Every structure is written in structure tokens, then in C-alpha cells.
Image: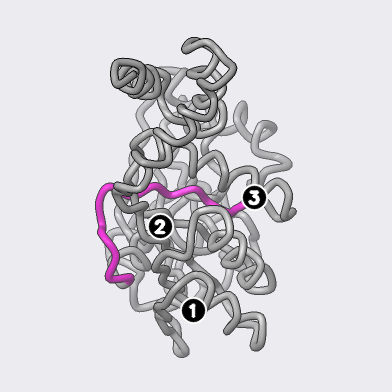
């Protein structure tokens, strides 16, 4: 049983989650000390074992044996919904492969909460966990997203981010994805909760001058339909077609823009027909 836990406010713990934890034969958790405080608050007496990225594979055989014996195994993360940027995926996959049922309860999730508070389009959205911590890798990941957007992806983008990296990440977003609208959810459901909205560049400067504290969820507006892209594509193709065959020009521009080859080829034929 996958059981979400509060991301800050203990009042968000559901009655069903409490009852399930009380009935559990074992609670698997990221940090037994964190979970012990939660269980104690709700007077839950349950056996706990740590399960994190380094030992999850080793827990699988034990959990499968317990499930075959009819025991109830609960999985929690330190905060929020298990598996969402937290351990548990490998265990769930193994339980499904073994032909046993997996159940989950609804509950707190910072990504969805930040999305609904952002004022940005709620669907479609794309949640991507944490961006790469190193700038080169982060910019490469953002460039891949930008290529997908040029190919037609239109989705609000959601990340978790460490507070000490937020300013750099926002600056990279402004540089690679464009200076679009963003929303920063900080300390959601906690005493000092706030949602800060603005442009990526403006908020990058703000948080560079004064680093934020606490848990951060970053929501970024989807790419806009850019009429200018059509003009840019035509310019690129005309340049490439000077000194290259149509096929070569299409290959060059497709690589440069990340656009679908069919779209580039169609535009190249249109330009060729114009003479």
C-alpha cells in the first residue's frame, strides 16, 4: 500500500492513511526517524524499516515473501506521495511482476499543489523531478525540452529544486527556454508558505540577491505558439539551400532546430517551388 504523508501540515494526513498505517505489519520509509515522529503524533505503533535508493533492491525479496503470507506492507516517503521523486518504483514493479496487487491512497503532493497555485495552464503538464545539479547537464536537459517544444510540445513544466540552486536554474531557464512566466512555490502547506510569480529572469535576479529557504517547487509556463518560428525556418532553409542540395539543407536545418523532418522538408519544397 502506497501511502502519501503530509508535506508540511500534519492536518493533511487522511483518516484512511492513519487507519492503514495502524493495520500495517511493516512500514517501509526513507528515514525511520522522520517517520517515527509522524507515527508517534498519530499514536501509530508499527514496525518500520528504511527503504531508500541504496537498499531498495535488497528489500524486494523480503517484501514479496511477506506479501505472499498475506501481510500488509505500507510504503511512505518522508513527505508527499511515494515514488514521486522518492523511492519505491523498483519495489512496485517487482510486486506487479510477481502477480500481486498494489494499492495506493490519494494525498499530499507538492508538484500538483504548486501547479494549481501557479496561475499557469494546469494541463497538459510535465513533471520532471529535480533538474540536473550541474549547469552543463541542466542546460543540456533544457535544450532537449526546447527542441521538443519546437517539435510541438506544449506543456506547463514542473520541477522540484534545492533552494541554493534556484537562482541558477531560473537563469538557465531564461537563457535556454526563454524568459517566460514562472511560479515558485515555497514551503507549501507550512507556516511560511508563499507562491512567488514573475518572469524567469526577474526571479533569477531576486533569488540571487536573496537566496530562498525551504522546499521549492518550480512551475514554468508552456512555450507559446511562435509565428516567428516559421519565418526563422524559412531563413535557415534558404541559407542552407545556398550551396547544398535540398536533401542536405533539410538535414542541416532539422539538426539545428530539432523540428520534425517532415515539417522542414515540406517548407523546403514550398521554398523550392517559389523559385
Which residue does the image show at 63% across and 46% down from the upper left? 51
Q: Quadrant of residue 194?
A: bottom left
CA separation in Å, label 3 and label 2: 32 Å
The residue beneath circle 3 is 139
Q: Residues within 10 Å of mark 3 (few under 14, many from 20)?
A: some
The residue beneath circle 2 is 4
Disc number lying in front (1 or 2): 1
Comes first in the chain, label 1 or label 2: 2
- Residue 180 among those drawn in magenta: no
Disc number lying in front (3 or 2): 3
Q: Nearer the viewer, residue 191 or 104?
A: 191
CA separation in Å, label 1 and label 2: 17 Å
Q: Quadrant of residue 59?
A: top right
Which residue does the image show at 47% across and 33% down from the upper left? 92
Which stretch did the figure color magenta? 118-131
**Lateral position of residue 60 relative to residue 8, left or right:** right
The residue beneath circle 1 is 187
Q: Position of residue 110 (x, y in %)?
A: 42, 64
* Quadrant position of the C terminus in the picture: top left
Which residue does the image show at 36% across and 17% down from the upper left? 272
**Lateral position of residue 160 relative to residue 227, left or right:** right
Amino acid at each position: 500500500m502506497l501511502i502519501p504523508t503530509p508535506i508540511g501540515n500534519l492536518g493533511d494526513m487522511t483518516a484512511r492513511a492513519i487507519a492503514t498505517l495502524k493495520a500495517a505489519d511493516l512500514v517501509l520509509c526513507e528515514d525511520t526517524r522522520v517517520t517515527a515522529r509522524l507515527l508517534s503524533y498519530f499514536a501509530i505503533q508499527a514496525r518500520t524499516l528504511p527503504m531508500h535508493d541504496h537498499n531498495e533492491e535488497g528489500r524486494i525479496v523480503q517484501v514479496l515473501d511477506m506479501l505472499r503470507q498475506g501481510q500488509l506492507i505500507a510504503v511512505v516517503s518522508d513527505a508527499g506521495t511515494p515514488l514521486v521523486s522518492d523511492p519505491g518504483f523498483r519495489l512496485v514493479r517487482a510486486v506487479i511482476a510477481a502477480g500481486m496487487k498494489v494499492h495506493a491512497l490519494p494525498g499530499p503532493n507538492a508538484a500538483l499543489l504548486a501547479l494549481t497555485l501557479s496561475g499557469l495552464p494546469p494541463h497538459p503538464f510535465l513533471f520532471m523531478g529535480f533538474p540536473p545539479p550541474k549547469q552543463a547537464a541542466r542546460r543540456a536537459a533544457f535544450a532537449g525540452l526546447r527542441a521538443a517544444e519546437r517539435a510541438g510540445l506544449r506543456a506547463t513544466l514542473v520541477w522540484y529544486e534545492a533552494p541554493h540552486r534556484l537562482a541558477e536554474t531560473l537563469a538557465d531557464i531564461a537563457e535556454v527556454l526563454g524568459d517566460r512566466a514562472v511560479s515558485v512555490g515555497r514551503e507549501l502547506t507550512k507556516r511560511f508558505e508563499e507562491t512567488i510569480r514573475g518572469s524567469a529572469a526577474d526571479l533569477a535576479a531576486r533569488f540571487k540577491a536573496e537566496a530562498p529557504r525551504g522546499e521549492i517547487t518550480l512551475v514554468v509556463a508552456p512555450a507559446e505558439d511562435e509565428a516567428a518560428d516559421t519565418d526563422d525556418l524559412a531563413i535557415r532553409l534558404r541559407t542552407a539551400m545556398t550551396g547544398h542540395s535540398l536533401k542536405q539543407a533539410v538535414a542541416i536545418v532539422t539538426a539545428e532546430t530539432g523540428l520534425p523532418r517532415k515539417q522542414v522538408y515540406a517548407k523546403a519544397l514550398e521554398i523550392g517551388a517559389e523559385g
